Amino acid sequence: MPNTKREKSMSVLLIAETNWLENIVLAQDSTSAYLMRLARTEKMVIAVPEYSFYEADGSLNRKLIKRAERIDEALS
């Protein structure tokens, strides 16, 4: 019989950064979404450095502005 206490302590720690956050927000990568689902099952713990949130925020703002500009150009 497996030791459930030991199994919980053997979770995988994933250290994710800016690109992973962007992939999640923009729904660009199925692997990133899969890892997020694993974290919900407590088979994995995801740690994201605070600076990655700031980087992703700035990067995502630029990407979304560029997309909006391209849409405006296409509709003009």
Image (tube, grey):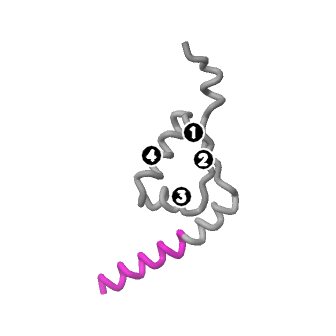
Indicate the quadrant where residue 7 lies: top right
Residue 38 x, y percent position in the rendering: 50, 39
Instruction: Look at the numbered disc 4 and give the secondary structure of its residue.
Output: helix
Tell me the amino acid under the disc marked 1. Answer: Met
The reply to whether dot 1 and dot 4 touch (C-beta < 8 Å) is no
Per the model, the C-alpha gap separating discs 1 and 4 is: 11 Å
| Vertical order, 22 against 70 (above or below) | above
The answer to which of marks 3 and 4 sits earlier in the sequence is 3
The circle on residue 34 is 4
Secondary structure under badge 1? strand
What span is in magenta? 60-76
User: Residue type at mark 3?
Assistant: Trp
In percent of width and height, residue 59 lies at 56, 71
In the picture as drawn, the residue positioned furthest to the left comes out as 75
Which type of secondary structure does the marked residue at label 3 adopt? helix
Mark 3 lies on residue: 20
Q: Quadrant of the C terminus?
A: bottom left
C-alpha span from label 4 to label 2:
13 Å
Q: Which residue is mark 1?
A: 44
Q: Residue furthest top?
A: 1
Q: Could you say which disc has been placed on residue 4 in the image?
A: none
* Label whose residue precedes the other's in the sequence (1 or 4): 4
Give the residue at mark 2: 14
Q: CA distance from mark 2 to mark 3?
A: 11 Å
Label 2 crowd bin: few (<14), some (14–19), many (20+), radius 10 Å: few
Rendered residue at 61%/17% (across/down): 3
Disc 3/disc 4 C-alpha distance (Å): 12 Å
- Horizontal placement of 17 versus 71: left or right? right
**Callout 1–callout 2 Cβ contact below 8 Å:** yes
Report how far apart the C-alphas of labels 1 and 3 lie in the structure.
15 Å
User: Which of the marked residues, 1 or 2, is nearer the chain's N terminus?
Assistant: 2
